[in-house]
Image (cartoon, rainbow, N blue to C red):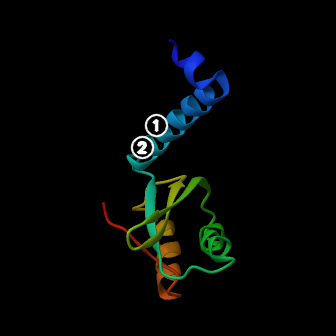
């Protein structure tokens, strides 16, 4: 029996889509232009506030992934420049000073 016949075409397509999303997430995590944040507060508007710091410094976020980890929620942010740039470090410094999140080191 073929997988398509056993599971159905819709479920098979959903599984392929999930596989592609997982591959993309893994590729994003290996990028030099990404950071992972550990969220220190979990409240409405937090993502808006965090992304506001990057906007304030003219930094474009190419992608955002959120996920749960053992110690809370995390955001994986794709950046338009190196995480070592002065503007990125400035945005992160402001965010950390406000007690919203901290960087998860590789």
- Report the Cα–Cα distance between label 2 and label 1: 5 Å
Q: Quadrant of the C terminus?
A: bottom left
In this image, 21 relative to 31: left or right? right
In this image, 105 relative to 33: left or right? left
Residue located beneath label 2 in the image: 26
What is the residue that sits farthest to the bottom in this orientation? Answer: 98
In this image, 90 relative to 57: left or right? left
How packed mark 1 is, by other alpha carbons closer than 10 Å (few <14, some 14-19, many 20 or more), is few
Q: Looking at the image, which is closer to me, 102 or 66?
A: 66
Q: Which mark is residue 78?
A: none
- Mark 1 and mark 2 in contact (Cβ < 8 Å)? yes
Q: Residue 46: where, in percent of width, then height?
A: 63, 76
What is the residue that sits farthest to the top in this orientation? Answer: 1
Q: Residue 14: where, in percent of width, then height?
A: 61, 33
In the rendered image, the vertical position of residue 2 relative to residue 83, given as above or below: above
Q: Looking at the image, which is closer to me, 9 or 5?
A: 5
What is the residue that sits farthest to the left in this orientation? Answer: 106
In the rendered image, the vertical position of residue 24 relative to residue 12, given as above or below: below
Residue at 48% across, 74% down = 92
Residue at 67% across, 27% down = 10
Q: Residue 22: where, in percent of width, then height?
A: 48, 41
Residue at 54% across, 39% down = 21
How packed mark 2 is, by other alpha carbons closer than 10 Å (few <14, some 14-19, many 20 or more), is few
Q: Residue 8: where, in percent of width, then height?
A: 63, 23
In this image, 62 relative to 30: left or right? right
Q: Which mark is residue 23?
A: 1
Residue at 58% across, 18% down = 4
Task: Count the numbered circles shown.
Answer: 2
- Label 2 element class: helix
Q: Looking at the image, which is closer to me, 94 or 10?
A: 10
- Label 1 element class: helix
């Amino acid at each position: 029996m073929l997988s398509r016949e056993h599971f159905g075409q819709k479920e098979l397509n959903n599984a392929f889509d999930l596989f592609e999303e997982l591959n993309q997430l893994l590729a994003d995590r290996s990028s030099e232009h990404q950071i992972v944040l550990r969220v220190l507060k979990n409240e409405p508007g937090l993502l808006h506030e965090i992304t506001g710091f990057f906007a304030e410094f003219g930094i474009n976020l190419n992608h955002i992934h959120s996920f749960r980890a053992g110690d809370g929620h995390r955001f994986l942010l794709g950046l338009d420049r190196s995480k070592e740039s002065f503007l990125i470090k400035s945005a992160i410094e402001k965010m950390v000073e406000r007690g919203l999140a901290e960087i998860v080191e590789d």
